[in-house]
Image (spheres, rainbow, N blue to C red):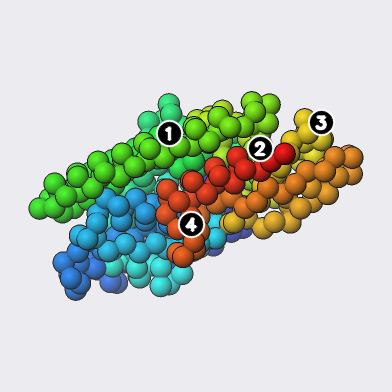
Amino acid sequence: MPRHNFAACPSQWLRVVFVILVVAVLTACGSASGSDAGDGRLQVVTTTGQIADVVRNVGGEHVTVNALMGPGVDPHLFVASEGDVDRLQQADVIFYNGLFLEAQMADVLQQIGERKPSIAVAEAIAPQNLLPWAQHTDEYDPHVWFDVSLWMKTVEAVRDTLIAADRPNADLYTANAATYLAELAALDAYVKTQVARVPPDQRVLVTAHDAFHYFGRAYGFDVRGLQGISTAAEAGTADVRELAGFIAEHKIRAIFIETSVPVRAVEALQAAVADRGFAVEIGGKLYSDALGSPDGNAATYVGMVRANIDTIVGALTKP
């Protein structure tokens, strides 16, 4: 686990206190799991909706999945409630992203992982395929789901974990994973087909924070975000000025807001571009760190990726 400077961030002390409380709760509650009192299905808790969607696809009818983070929730800032801790305690298996995405929960998840299967799915990806986090030399960019081919590795991690936890249904998990991997391969091809519609000089993606670098590497986009990889860092005036100058100089047609990040920074960027005599449109909302609402077109991982690429391509190819 990477080391961080607690003195530089008082919220780190709150995390330490919270971890102590969680450990006390887990010790008091023992090692009871959800399947002991349930319907025989594996009780799975995930942090993000993206991971929950993988588990539902692989686990099918033999798992019950509970995602702690709903639509529009920023995992960088999420702090588990008492109810969340109870759900984690009742789970048979826990899946989280890792790579310090769930920053405020990292120590809690590590502690719980000493008592039951707790899998960081993004850490199943080989380090040489991960992108570095410039601010922390010992950490990686956690937003791996924006490269569909990389995200397929997490499906394999979920499959293998479910098989280990429920061997009688191993064949079902294997078959479900194969079906879902084929769907993701088709999704990856769809993204590449859509990207081909964008002129090469317009393949620039400007968003609220640096969540899309895996997307950029996989699909040939220059990606620029106002905030850093974590939304805990605010964009400064100099950041806005620099990016506004780039957009005006290169006549980038559109910039994008994110559903899990406040819009004010992107609106300030748009105004700064206008001050330079160029009008840039806000091309729409992108789903970055969370899925969309359950009744929307981005309620699943596949739906989220399709919605994002359709929004990006539509805005950047608009006459």
User: Please, what is the three-letter code of the amino acid marked with disc 2?
Assistant: Thr
- Residue at which label 1 appears: 189
Marks 4 and 1 sit apart, C-alpha to C-alpha, by 19 Å
Q: Earlier in the sequence, mark 4 or mark 2?
A: 4
User: Please, what is the three-letter code of the amino acid marked with disc 4?
Assistant: Asn
In this rendering, position of residue 75 left or right of residue 180: right
Numbered disc in front, either 2 or 3: 2
User: Please, what is the three-letter code of the amino acid marked with disc 3?
Assistant: Glu
- Residue at which label 3 appears: 249
Mark 1 and mark 3 residues within 8 Å of each other at the beta carbon: no
Q: Quadrant of the C terminus?
A: top right
Q: Image height check: is 153 above or below 66?
A: above
Percent x, y of residue 279: 82, 43
Numbered disc in front, either 1 or 2: 2
Percent x, y of residue 42: 22, 61
Q: Is residue 123 visible?
A: no
Marks 2 and 3 sit apart, C-alpha to C-alpha, by 18 Å
Numbered disc total: 4
Callout 4 secondary element:
loop
Marks 4 and 2 sit apart, C-alpha to C-alpha, by 22 Å
Q: Image height check: is 161 above or below 220?
A: below
Marks 1 and 2 sit apart, C-alpha to C-alpha, by 19 Å
Numbered disc in front, either 4 or 2: 2
Q: Earlier in the sequence, mark 4 or mark 1?
A: 1
- Residue at which label 2 appears: 317
Residue closer to the observer: 243 or 137: 243
User: Please, what is the three-letter code of the amino acid marked with disc 1?
Assistant: Ala
Callout 2 secondary element:
loop
Numbered disc in front, either 3 or 4: 4
